[in-house]
Amino acid sequence: MVSVKGKSLEGLLTEFRRFYPSTEFKKNAHLTSKEEIEKLSKYPEKFWESYASELHWYKKWNKVLDWNPPHSKWFVDGELNVCYNCVDRHIKNGGRNKAAIIWEGEPGDTKTLTYWDLYREVNKFANVLKKLGISKGDRVAIYMPMIPEAVIAMLACARIGAIHMVVFGGFSSEALRDRINDCKAKLLVTADGGYRRGSLIPLKHDSDYAVKDTPSIENVLIIKRGEFPLRVKKGRDFWWHELEEEVEPYCEPESMNSDDSLFILYTSGTTGKPKGVLHSTGGYLTGVYTTSKLIFDMKDQDVFWCTADIGWITGHSYIVYGPLAVGATLFMYEGAPDWPEMDRYWRIIDKYGITIFYTAPTAIRAFMKAGTEYLKPFSLETLRLLGSVGEPINPEAWIWYYTHIGKKRCPIVDTWWQTETGMIMVTTLPGYHTMKPGHAGFPFPGVSLDILNEAGEPVDPDEGGYLVLKSPWPSMLKGIYGDEEKYLEKYWSKWNGKYYFTGDGARRDSEGYLMLLGRVDDVLSIAGHRVGTMEVESALVSHPSVAEAAVVGITHEITGQAIVGFIVLRDNIDKDFDLEDSIREHVVKKIGPIARPRKIIFSSELPKTRSGKIMRRLLKDIAEGKVLGDTTTLTEPEVIDNLKKQYEIIEG
Ligand code: WT7
């Protein structure tokens, strides 16, 4: 824990400022009273049940929770359909003409879908899925740009009870292939392409490489986004716009058991292979519905913008399912924040009157660095609440966000959660809590957590420890797809099945505010995205010139962490610039651009302990320049050899 504690604490100890929601915000917020919040926290099952009751169920549950550690079943024997709840329910309740999705493409094209439009599209999409032989329980891979059809495809799967598996459009074809093969998806839904920083991302073209080696895929359904060149394989590939002409306009939603699976989403862990996190139907929807309503304080007139990609859990829970379950209007943007200029987000906020804005600290730090000049032409006056997610937000970035984007008027919710938790677990409640920059806040009502030492005992206030969750929550993962053993080992083995281990370090101050201290395992956080060191190492060693590799994360001022790869080359390979580039690009090909190593350091060997364990701490210090000051000298193998000797002397 030492490495986790040291750094993050220093900067934050000097932060004493407090911020309060305005009287006006408090007056109108959903949740504002101490008694109510205490009551909710005290009777979690009653609390969750009351929110689940706001949703539509075909059959009511017999029991709120069945806790069979480490598996929980929520709303036992209840039956519902997620798509019905996110679409049909609002049409029946008078929301037919309300905007469900307002979208802007990167080139500036725009589209609005009312709840009625969404209903029509989703119904047809569901019938197209059926036409392609998809039925309840089948897995459907979705590899799409940020266009409304991505949301439509997800909802259509939910409508017929198929399990979607969305792969971030920035992942490589090999990453797509591996995920498809792990869950044996039958259908791949993709698009001809999408726009990013002015260039075309040829998703169908990349998909073709993936599906060459995916025996389970029977068909590929292509959405037409633009005029992207591609090949259509007869009998296997179909255009959505052609098939939609051939199907009925209505598809009866499937009545699903509350514990049926809604989706699989792969996330990086401590092994070389990503894990398929499996989420439920009734519990998941209740979790994201409740948190959307109470944490983002969503109201009828809000336009909610979460800047994540639908390929991440943030996109699943707070672009698609949470906001649509609430019946809100969501805004969706296809492209990059700095395209064509650094002012794109502010331009969008003013143009569409965004009221709630949810983004990541990496983006905030990049805007901060670009300066406030870009903000001048915009009023941002429609904003009333801001959110942050993905990594700890440093007080400096917090204050900048508060001052320059929220204009000291909007509360900020710093929300901590994970792919596995499905919903926000730690935050402040915007109409109630005092905000402390750098501190995420408190467990959400109904969430029970603690901070433990290695022995599993709770630590004292202000002391760092491991963050654990003590009792089940509705949107808790069901498990790891096809790998129960890994589920037990990864999350439950550290304290003999007693607690869910988050993999994060945290500390709590005397007032109960939680501060997150980053991952304590071999998982990196690059721009708020999880990348496993082992995953990058396996990619590196699969390069023909690489014999051995070790990956560490170093601190980076914008992205939080950056990847450094230490490489031992095979015999008789000369290192030159081309080789360095080819190794970097090899990782991009294997995983995707987010895993591209920022630095490659060549060495004749890697420093190891006598038992053969790579000394990562030492490598990290070397990469951060702490040991030698200047890392450029480290391309000389002798230096590492020397270091190794020194290190062994120190460590005995
Ligand atoms: C990991 C989960 C869930 C949203 C996106 C990431 C880190 C997430 C915060 C925050 C400090 C945070 C943790 C967590 N993290 N939010 N507000 N403050 N750290 O999902 O890819 O599953 O990553 O992101 O380390 O374990 P994910």
Image (tube, rainbow, N blue to C red):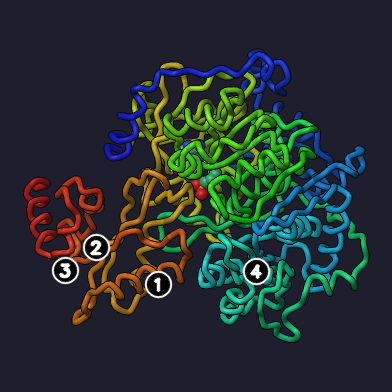
Rate crowding at label 4 as few (under 14), some (14 to 19) or many (20 or more) other CA atoms within 10 Å: many
Q: How far across and how far down the image is residue 551, in percent?
A: 31, 58
If you read the primary sequence from the N terminus, does the residue marked by circle 2 or circle 4 appear first? 4
Q: Please name which of the two marks, 2 or 4, marks the residue nearer to the observer.
A: 4
Q: Tell me if the residue at label 3 has its CB under 8 Å from ligand 1.
A: no
Dot 1 amino acid type: His
Rate crowding at label 1 as few (under 14), some (14 to 19) or many (20 or more) other CA atoms within 10 Å: some
Q: How far across and how far down the image is residue 168, in percent?
A: 58, 60
Residue 48 lies left or right of residue 267; in this view the side is: right
- Residue 304 shows in this picture: yes
If you read the primary sequence from the N terminus, does the residue marked by circle 4 or circle 1 appear first? 4
Q: How far across and how far down the image is residue 234, in percent?
A: 74, 86
Which labelled disc corresponds to residue 604?
3
Residue 588 lies left or right of residue 564; in this view the side is: right
Q: Which residue is mark 1?
A: 586
Which labelled disc corresponds to residue 193?
4
Q: CA distance from mark 4 to mark 3?
A: 43 Å
- Residue 497 shows in this picture: no
Front one among 185 and 586: 586
At a point 22% along the width and 80% down the height, the residue shown is 573
Q: Please name which of the two marks, 2 or 3, marks the residue nearer to the observer.
A: 2
Dot 2 amino acid type: Ile
Q: How far across and how far down the image is residue 610, in percent?
A: 15, 58
Q: Which residue is mark 2?
A: 601
- Kindly give the residue lying farthest to the bottom in the view shown: 234
